[in-house]
Amino acid sequence: MPSITYIEHNGTKHTVDVPVGSSVMRGAVDNNIPGIDADCGGECACATCHVHVDAAWLAATGARTAQEETMLSFANGTEDDSRLSCQIDVTPALDGLIVRMPAGQH
């Protein structure tokens, strides 16, 4: 299973194994990692799973979809590295992925 590191806004790190075929959001929710609310349950309908993808991993996580772009327009503090973690599918290539949570999701 790929290992993913989630870094809270305060710097606290959580490294967990996430099953291939799951989403980065699901990995956080299933492991009770604070900072990803996931109010819509991963339907790309709320932007409460916003993360900042470590620069070294941007290409590996793929491009944003049009729907994701729309949802991110409602999120606070978006940057070029912003993604909705529900839209990042976990693959073996993401072993070592690092994502950072923003100060808040609302």
Image (cartoon, helix red, strand yellow):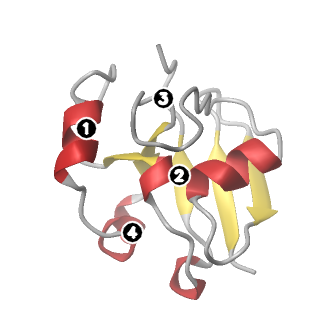
User: Residue 64 versus residue 39: which sits nearer the camera?
Assistant: 39
Identify the residue position indicated by label 2 in the image: 99
The Cα–Cα distance between marks 3 and 4, rounded to whole angstroms, is 18 Å
| Contact check, label 3 and label 4, Cβ < 8 Å | no
The Cα–Cα distance between marks 2 and 4, rounded to whole angstroms, is 11 Å
Q: Is residue 92 left or right of residue 44?
A: right
Q: Amino acid at mark 1?
A: Glu
Identify the residue position indicated by label 3 in the image: 102
| Contact check, label 2 and label 3, Cβ < 8 Å | no
| Contact check, label 2 and label 1, Cβ < 8 Å | no
- The outermost residue toward the bottom is 92
Q: Residues within 10 Å of mark 1 (few under 14, many from 20)?
A: few
Q: Assign a secondary structure to mark 3.
A: loop
Q: Position of residue 3 (x, y in %)?
A: 71, 71
The Cα–Cα distance between marks 1 and 4, rounded to whole angstroms, is 15 Å
Q: Assign a secondary structure to mark 2.
A: strand
The Cα–Cα distance between marks 2 and 1, rounded to whole angstroms, is 13 Å
Q: Is residue 1 left or right of residue 73?
A: right
The Cα–Cα distance between marks 2 and 3, rounded to whole angstroms, is 10 Å
Residue 12's place in the image compared with 56, above or below, is above
Q: Assign a secondary structure to mark 4.
A: helix
Residue at x-position 64% and y-position 35%: 8
Q: Residues within 10 Å of mark 4 (few under 14, many from 20)?
A: some
Residue at x-position 53% and y-position 36%: 101
Rendered image: mark on residue 101 = none
User: Residue 60 versus residue 46: which sits nearer the camera?
Assistant: 46
Rendered image: mark on residue 61 = 4
Rendered image: mark on residue 79 = 1
